[in-house]
Amino acid sequence: MELENWLKTASCYIHDVLLENGYSQDTAAYLNLLVNVAVVLVLIFVLDYVLRRVIIRAFNIFSNSTKTSFDDHLAQSNFPKYTAHVIPFIIFDHLIPYTFSGFPALELFFRKATDIYLIILVVWIIRSIIKSTKAYLRTKPYFHDKPLDSYSQIVIMVVWGFAILVIFSELADQSIRTFLTTLGAASAILLLIFRDTILGFVASIQVSVNDMVRIGDWITHEKFGADGDVIEINLTTVKVQNFDNTITTLPTYSLISDSFKNWRGMQVSGGRRIRRAIYLKSSSVKFLSEEDLNRFSEIQAIKSYIDHRQRDIDKFNRENEIDKHLFVNGRNQTNLGIFRKYCDLYLNNHPAINKELMIMTRHLAPTPQGIPLEIYAFSADKRWENYERIMADIFEHIIAAVPYFDLEIFESPAGSDLKGFNG
C-alpha cells in the first residue's frame, strides 16, 4: 500500500509542480506524461540491459560447469536472453496505470501492447526450449535418423496457435471459448488454407510410425526426380541431396500418396543385387560334337563339369539305345548350356560376390533381339562406385568369353556394317 501511494505521488509530482508555477492544466498534464514515459523507459531499458548481462553470464557459467550439453543448446538458442526480458516488462506492465494517469486511452493501448508482447515472449522462450531439445536429441544415436524437425514444428505450431487465440482474445476482450466457437464455424476455410500443413502433419506421423523414411536413407522418387540421400524431414517438405549434389524438395505427404523406392533394405542387407542380361543370337546355339567338347574342355573352369555331364549323357543314351547319327536324338550338351554353367562357376569364384546370397544364371523368354542370359547375384560391397566396378568387371569378362563358346552377342547393325550392302 505504501509503495502504491508513493508511485501515485511520484507520477503526479511534475504535474503538481507545474501547476504551482502557473502552467495550465493541459500543459502540466502533457509535460507530466512525457516525463513519466521518459523515466519509465530509461528505467526499463537499464534494468533490461543489466538483467540480460547478468542472466546470460550466469547461465554460461552454469552450462560450462555441467556435464550435459542440453544447457549449452539452450544458451545457443537465446533462452537466457528471452528470459531476461520477462521481468522488465512485467514491471512496465505494473507501472502503466501510474505512467499514463489521466490518459485512459493510452493506458489501455500500452497495457494491451505489453500483454501481447509478453505472450509473444513466452512463445519465444518455449520455442527456444523446443529447438534446444531437438538439437540435444540429435546428439543421441537413437534419434539421429528420426524426423525431429517435423515433431518440433508441430509443437511450435500448436504453441503459436494457442498464443494467437490468446492475443485475439486480449484485443477483443472476449473469452477464448468465444473465439474457438467462431473458428469452428470457419473450419472449412481453415482446412483449405492449411491443407498442405495438415497433410504434412498426417504424413509425418505415418512416416515416423511406419518407419518409412529416415534421415540418411537413400531414396528414389521418380515423380519428383529425386535420387539421393534424405538430409531433412520436416512438417511440409523432405529434402533429398541427389548424387550430383543438387537438392530436390518434395512434399512430405508424397511419401504416403505416391510410390517411391527406399534403398535402406539393400544397405542393411548382406549385398547389393546385380541383375543384368546379355542377348545371344539364337542362331549361334548348337549341339556339341566330340571335337567341340574336347576343345571346350581346355577351359579349366568347366573341364570337370563337361566330363561329368558327358558321362551321364552317354550312359543315358546307351541304356536307352539312342541312335546318335543325328545330334537331335537323345540327350546332348549345347554350347549355351555349357556357357551358362561357366557363368555360374565364374560368379561363385568371384571374390566380390556374396556367396551367402542367391547366385544364378538363367534364360529369359526369347526376344526379337535374341536369347537373354541373365546374371543374378549380389555384390558384397554395397557402395555405389564399387558396386559399379564389380558389375563392370563381371560383364567385361563374360562378354569377352562369349566367342570361346561359339556364341554371338546380338547387336543392331551399324552404318559401317551396311556400307557394302547394295540391296
Image (spheres, grey):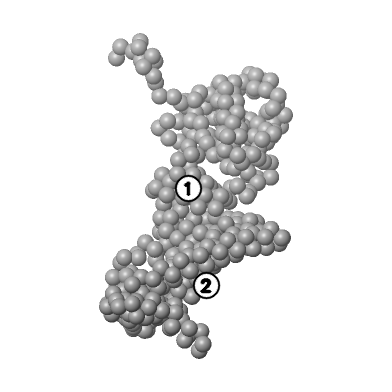
Q: Nearer the viewer, mark 1 or mark 2?
A: 2
Q: Residues within 10 Å of mark 2 (few under 14, many from 20)?
A: some
Percent position (x, y) of residue 3? 51, 84
Picture residue at 38% right of the left edge, 14% below the top = 416
With respect to residue 413, does 28 lie above or below? below
- Relative side of 100 to 271, left or right: left
| Residue on which disc 1 sits | 240
Residue 393 appears in the figure = yes
Q: Residue 198 appears at what percent x and percent y?
A: 39, 66
In which quadrant of the rendered image does the C terminus lie?
top left
Pointer 2 residue: 87
| Element class at badge 1 | strand
- Examine the rendered structure and indicate whether residue 31 appears above or below residue 235: below
Q: Foreground: 196 or 369?
A: 196
* Residue 288 location, quadrant: top right
Q: Residues within 10 Å of mark 1 (few under 14, many from 20)?
A: many
Specify the amino acid type for callout 1.
Val
Task: Give the mark, 1 or 2, whose residue is nearer the N terminus.
Answer: 2
Residue 10, placed above or below residue 284: below
Q: How many marks?
A: 2
Tell me which residue sits at (49%, 28%) in the image: 280
